[in-house]
Amino acid sequence: MASHTTSLVRTALGATALAGVLLVSGCSFAEEGRMRTASADATVAGAVTAVELTGVRRGSVEVTPGSGPGVVVHRTVHYRGDRTPTPGQQVSHGVLTFSEGCADTCWTDYRLEVPASAKVKVGNSSGRITVTGVAAAELDSDSGDVRAERIAGPLKVRTSSGDITGTALNGPEAEVRSGSGNATLGFTRAPDSVSVTATSGDVTLKVPGAGPYRVDASSTSGDRDITVPVAPEARAALAVRTTSGDIRVSAP
């Protein structure tokens, strides 16, 4: 009987020890998998004429006009593990580019203050893009909403999935392509050329009402509502096409 009791005690102690090992191991795994954040701000003092932030795997990007010829960079890096990533940037011939400085398990949120005269190019795989008050913009997102405001020059936007919104645009031309999502553009000055293509989503285009405009609008499945002055020989051309969705072209 004593031998049997001793065996039970040893079994209980062994189970307790194993549970302790598993608990410690579990804490270790949780610590290793915990997401950390770090700030990685910088100031680029030299004159910048163009900003290119492409190949961003994940994270939001916000670009606003700053007060100087350089760029103020605000970054929040999200990562795992004990090693803090070291993102960087460099300027070559007036073009500012970036490096994330981390592996596939991390991502970075960007907030940039750039010269209003700069041309901006942004591309990411997942995350919101917002660009305001620059000379020109080329924006590309695989998944995420894109917003452009007060763009003075040409605008190009492409999304595979996400809404596109352009407000207070006064550039001469805009080219927008959306795979899945609504596209809404509003101009404060009559553009020379606008092209909007959407596979699945509504398209709303607002332009100054004086016109006239040469309008080419077609939807495979959806309604069309064109209320701006139209003339076949007009210099300003508006082309809007959607496979599934409504089209509205009007004055503000």
Image (cartoon, rainbow, N blue to C red):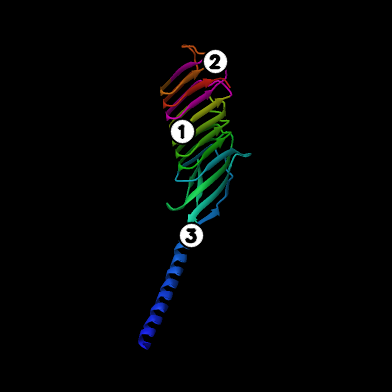
Quarter placement of the C terminus: top right
The amino acid type, in three-letter code, at marker 3 is Arg
Front: mark 3 or 2 = 2
Q: In the picture, residue 218 is in which quadrant?
A: top left
Residue 85 seen in this snapshot: no
Screen quadrant of the N terminus: bottom left
Residue at 49% x, 11% y is 231
The amino acid sitting under disc 2 is Gly
Instruction: Identify the residue position indicated by label 3 in the image.
Output: 83
From this viewpoint, which residue is outermost toward the bottom?
2
Q: Secondary structure at mark 2?
A: loop
Residue 74 forms part of the magenta stretch: no
Residue 181, label in figure: 1
Q: Residue drawn at (46%, 26%), measured in percent from left and top? A: 196
Residue under label 2, please give it: 211
Q: Residue at x 55, y 26 (%)?
A: 186
Q: Position of residue 66 (x, y in %)?
A: 61, 39
